[in-house]
Image (spheres, rainbow, N blue to C red):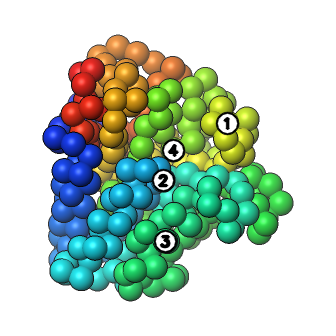
Amino acid sequence: MSGAPEVRRHQDADVLVGDVASALLERLEAAQGRGEVPHVGLTGGTIAEALHRELARRAPDSSVDWSRVVFWWGDERFVPAGSPDRNAGQAREALLDHVPVDPANVHEVPASDQVATAEDAAAAYDAALREHGAGSFEVMMLGIGPDGHCASLFPGHPALEVRDAVAVAVHDSPKPPPDRVSLTFEAIARSRSVWFIASGAGKAEAVARALAEDGSVTETPARGARGEETVWWLDEDAASRL
């Protein structure tokens, strides 16, 4: 596990999105320059959608070979494939449909109209990561909820305690929809860099709890998500309680 997380503060959400996009493109270019095929974990939410659109806008001017980037998700809602609640659908609309990805390198969590249960979806995603994963993610992007959750790992939830698994089914999510699939802390830890991206005053208290010297993962799950390095990308509103 990494040492202390690094905090990067930005004036506002637009500057935040631009800086994260620049850093991610540079990181992908560097990995490919080393002859690697980087694996990236995408997230959902408003700021992630803005980031995806900015990446798509900048893609033509970057040297990233998008056919040699492998995409995963930190979590997914267990809903039908066409649902607007799907993180994968949001990412496709904002980014993946606009850059020349290799479809074989886009690994979605199975949807509720493709497998019977969230447990089946988690097992299939677990198997896909073990078969097609690189052993580590170059970057795992995560958001944080006002309650301190990350991916679909919620405060006090049994999924926080899961070990020896890559993905886990989550039921009774306090935030709808109730059924989800999430990477585990152990899977997230296999990241060269975990990037938390947070914008807005509504995230400030959770960010402060996640970065406080004292506190529990049970109460603030984002405290438990670490990579070899961990970076918090924040706008001033999200950082206002630090």
Quarter assignment of residue 213:
top left
| Of 218 and 164, the residue lying toward us | 218
Of labels 1 and 3, the one closer to you: 3
Q: In the image, residue 222 lies at what x, y percent?
A: 43, 33
Instruction: Give neighbour class at mark 4: few <14, some 14-19, many 20+ (Cα, 10 Å).
Output: many
Q: CA distance from mark 4 to mark 2?
A: 9 Å
User: Quick check: marks 4 and 3 in contact, CB under 8 Å?
Assistant: no
| Position of residue 9 in the picture relative to residue 198 (left or right) | left
Residue corresponding to mark 1: 173
Cβ atoms at labels 4 and 2 below 8 Å apart: no
Mark with earlier residue (4, 1)? 4
Q: Give the SS element for disc 2.
A: loop
Q: Amino acid at mark 2?
A: Gly
Question: What crowding class fits label 2: few (fewer than 14 Cα within 10 Å), some (14-19), or many (20 or more)?
Answer: many
**Residue 177 horizontal side relative to residue 213, left or right:** right
Q: Secondary structure at mark 4?
A: loop
Give the residue type that dot 4 points to: Ala
Residue at numbered disc 2: 44
- The residue under the point 51% across, 44% down is 151
Secondary structure beneath label 3:
helix
From this view, report whether residue 159 is shown above or below residue 215: below
Q: Alpha-carbon neighbours of circle 1 within 10 Å: few (<14), some, or many (≥20)?
A: some
Instruction: Name the residue at the right extreme.
Output: 116
Task: Tell me the tag on residue 93.
Answer: 3
